[in-house]
């Protein structure tokens, strides 16, 4: 299934680069090519690919934000009611990315925070200095802060993020956010409770995997400790 975009593609820098990228991906070395490469070349390739994933992630974030702005502008021109502006954007992004509309909507929120309020973190991602996961961890943990506080966190963490893991990036951002706005921790906890959920997916041999994200007190009362077994 292909994404349905309201604007026709043209001869733009984006379309030209997309074609170049498609050609580059077609020429990516496969198993046999890699098997004949030296370990030094392989480790260089791994590092280059990791940096490339960051740069591509940043490009995708920018593209989604610009696409949203373009779609909203078109909807305004068409006379769409203010409360309906942006409707359908996440669905089109979801089709393009082959993810659910909910996931696409959540990702678009993160990408907007990055692109619109965290320029230094975004620049690190563009340069491949941090991973897309690390950038998302920073964005998620400044979600409830004001733009001014986000800018401060962005500035303070700029020099530290490249040396940190994604999880450490999230912890450092969360700690600083709590210092700047203690009430934000309460807001974040309330939002987390509202987003509690239970899911189930199939597992081999006729089994199922039950996955639950719950407040700590409920998790404990359910007996979800690592050593707890149910009959």
Image (spheres, rainbow, N blue to C red):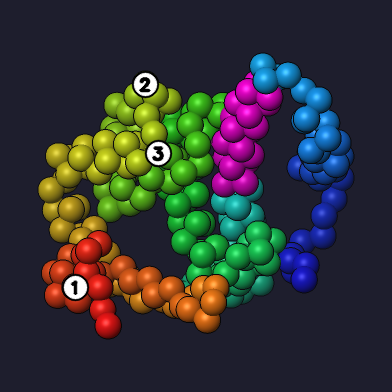
Q: Quadrant of residue 228?
A: bottom left
Query: Considering depth in this image, is 128 or 6 the residue closer to the camera?
Result: 128
What is the secondary structure assignment of the residue under circle 2? loop
Residue indicated by mark 1: 223
CA separation, marks 2 and 3? 14 Å
Image vertical order of residue 81 relative to residue 130, above or below: below
Q: Position of residue 197 (x, y in %)?
A: 34, 74
Sooner in the amino-acid sequence: mark 1 or mark 3: 3
Estimate the x, y position of residue 125 in percent, counting from the top left: 52, 33
Please tell me how crowded label 3 is: few (under 14), some (14-19), or many (20+) other residues with Cα within 10 Å: many
Mark toward the start of the polypeptide (2 vs 3): 2
- Give the mark nearest the N terminus, 1 or 2: 2
Q: Nearer the viewer, residue 119 or 171?
A: 171
Check disc 1 and report its element: helix, strand or loop: loop
C-alpha span from label 1 to label 3: 29 Å
Which label lies toward us, 1 or 2? 1
Which residue is at 57% across, 69% downward? 100
Mark 3 secondary-structure assignment: helix
């Amino acid at each position: 299934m292909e994404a349905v975009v309201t604007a026709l593609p043209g001869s733009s820098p984006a379309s030209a680069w997309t074609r170049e990228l498609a050609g580059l991906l077609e020429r990516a070395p496969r198993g046999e090519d890699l098997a004949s490469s030296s370990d030094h070349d392989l480790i260089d390739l791994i590092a280059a690919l990791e940096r490339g994933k960051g740069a591509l992630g940043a490009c995708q974030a920018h593209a989604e934000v610009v696409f949203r702005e373009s779609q909203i502008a078109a909807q305004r021109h068409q006379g769409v009611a203010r409360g309906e502006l942006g409707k359908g954007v996440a669905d089109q992004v979801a089709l393009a990315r082959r993810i659910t509309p909910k996931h696409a909507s959540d990702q678009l929120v993160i990408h907007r925070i990055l692109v619109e309020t965290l320029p230094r973190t975004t620049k690190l991602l563009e340069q491949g200095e941090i991973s897309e996961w690390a950038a998302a961890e920073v964005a998620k943990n400044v979600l409830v802060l004001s733009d001014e506080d986000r800018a401060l966190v962005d500035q303070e963490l700029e020099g530290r993020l490249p040396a940190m893991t994604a999880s450490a990036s999230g912890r450092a951002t969360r700690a600083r956010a709590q210092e700047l706005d203690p009430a934000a921790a309460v807001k974040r906890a309330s939002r987390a409770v509202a987003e509690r959920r239970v899911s189930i997916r199939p597992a081999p041999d006729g089994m199922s995997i039950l996955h639950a994200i719950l407040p700590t007190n409920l998790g404990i009362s359910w007996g979800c400790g690592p050593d707890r077994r149910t009959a």
